[in-house]
Amino acid sequence: MSDSVVRFDLPQSQIPRQWYNVQPDLPRPLPPVLHPGTHQPVGPDDLAPLFPMALIMQEVSQERHIDIPDEVREIYKLWRPTPLLRARRLEKALDTPAHIYYKYEGASPSGSHKLNTAAPQAYYNKAEGGHGLTTETGAGQWGTALSQACSFFGLDCEVYMVKVSYQQKPYRRVMMQTYGANVYASPSDRTQSGRAILAKNPDSTGSLGIAISEAVEMAATSGGKYKYALGSVLNHVFMHQTVIGLEAIQQLELAGEYPDVIVGCAGGGSNFAGIVLPFLPDKLKGGKDIRIIAVEPLSCPSLTRGKYAYDFGDTAGVAPMVKMYTLGHNFVPPPVHAGGLRYHGMGSIISDLYDQDIIEAQAIPQTETFQAAMTFARSEGIVPAPEPSHAIAQVIREARAAKEAGEKRVILFNLSGHGYFDMAAYEQYLSGGLTDYAQPEDEIAAAIAELPTL
Ligand SMILES: *Cc1c(COP(=O)(O)O)cnc(C)c1O
C-alpha cells in the first residue's frame, strides 16, 4: 500500500521558521559586488537608495539561519508547504527504474516560486517605512508576485514590463493591475535610460536588462519614496527561496528516499538555488554524492557558453557589477518562450559553485523542452511553464540514462511554476511553428567583448 503514495504533504506547522543562508558554508567567500561608477566594492550606504537595510544585511550575512518574520510566515501559509509529488505516471511512461520527485511551486497564488521572495521583500520595505517598490518583469511572473506582495503589505507597485511581453501577454498585465500595480511598457519615456534607448531605436521591443535600468533609475531618483526589488540573482533572494529545499528535505524523509540527482532550470538562478542550496552541506561536508544540474536554454546559455567575469546587472550600467557567468549586458537573447530564462547573467552564488565544478550545467533546445512538457502534462496532468520544462527535459534525459545503466536513481526537480498563462507558446508548439535557436558563436563573442574592463 505505502509504495503507491504519490503525494507527500507537510502540515502548516512545518513551514520553515528560518531561511538557510549558504554563505558561511561556501568553500570560498563570494567575490565582492562593485559600484558601477567607481568599480570599488559597494557598502551598505551605496545600496541604501535601492534596498531596505534588512535586505542589504541579508545580502552579506554570514549567519547560517535567519528567522522568517511572523508576518511573512502568515503569508506563506496561503500556499505553503507546497506538495512534493512522486511522478509515478511519468516514470511509467518512460519505463525507467528511476524514482522521480518534484516540488510543485506552481501551487502559489501567483503560480510560481517568486512569491517566496516577493512577500519578505515587501514586508521589509514596509517595516522600514517604504511607500512603494519599482521593478521589472519579463514573462510577468515576477511582476505578478510582487504586485500581490505589495497589495498584501499596502505598498505601491510600479512595474516596467518588457515591451514585447506587454504586447504579447496582455493578461499578465491585467493580473498585475488587478493587484493594484501600475504597469509600463519598457523602454518607456518615463526614465532617462528608456528615453536613450528609444532615441537610438524607436522600435525597441525591450529586454530585461533595459527594464531593470528603468526600474532602478526610478527608485534611485525618487528621493526615498520608492525602493527597488529584484526577483532573482541576489543572495537574499536565493536565501528566501530555500524554503523550497528545506521542505523538500523533510518530504523526502517521509518518502524514505534521498536524491542522487537534483535538477532545476536557471534564469538568474533563484528557483534552482532554492531547491539545491539546503542540500549543499550534505554534498560538501556530509559525503553525499549528489549530482546537481542547472538547466538553461540553448538560446541563452549563460553558464555553458558565458564568461565568468564582472558585468553590470542591467543594460544601461546603472545597477551594481557582479562577478558572474555572463553573456554580456548587451546580449539580447532570441525570443524563446521561456521568458524567465532570458537573463544575460547568473547569480553570484550559482556562478561560483559552477566555477568550482560543484554543480553541473546543461543547455537544452526549445523543441526538446516542449516535447518534455507534453510528456509531463500527459502523464502527471500539470501543464508546466516553459521555464521548468527545461528541468523536465533534463530529468527525462537522466531517467533514460538510469534505464540504460539499469539503476534505480532518485531524481528530484523543482517544478517552479505552471504554464496556464503560456497557452500561446503551447499553441505554437502544437501547430509545429516552434523553432530552435542556437546562438552563433560570433554573436556571443561580440557581446562578451563589450564586458566592462576593471
Ligand atoms: C522567473 C522564473 C524562472 C527563472 O528565474 P530563476 O530566478 O532562475 O528561478 C523559472 N521558472 C519560473 C516559473 C519563473 O517564474
Image (cartoon, rainbow, N blue to C red):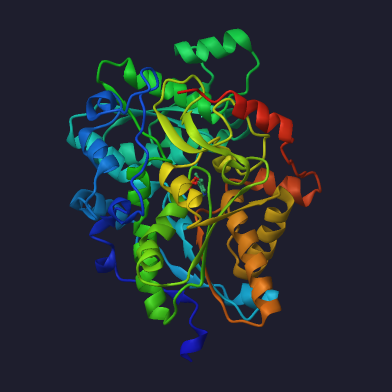
Q: Position of residue 24 (x, y in %)?
A: 28, 53
Residue lying farthest to the top in this orientation: 199
Q: Quadrant of residue 247?
A: bottom left
Count of numbered badges drawn on the protein: 0
Q: Position of residue 260 (x, y in %)?
A: 51, 72
Q: Position of residue 13 (x, y in %)?
A: 24, 67
Residue lying farthest to the bottom in this orientation: 1
In the image, is residue 165 above or below residue 11? above
Q: Position of residue 32 (x, y in %)?
A: 34, 35
In the image, is residue 435 above or below residue 283? above
Q: Is residue 131 left or right of residue 273?
A: left
In the image, 271 versus 323, the foreground residue is: 323
In the image, 255 versus 345, the foreground residue is: 345
In the image, 234 versus 324, the foreground residue is: 324
In the image, is residue 77 above or below residue 49? below
Q: Is residue 238 left or right of residue 305?
A: left
> Residue at 65% across / 16% down in the picture?
203
> Residue at 59% across / 32% down in the picture?
165
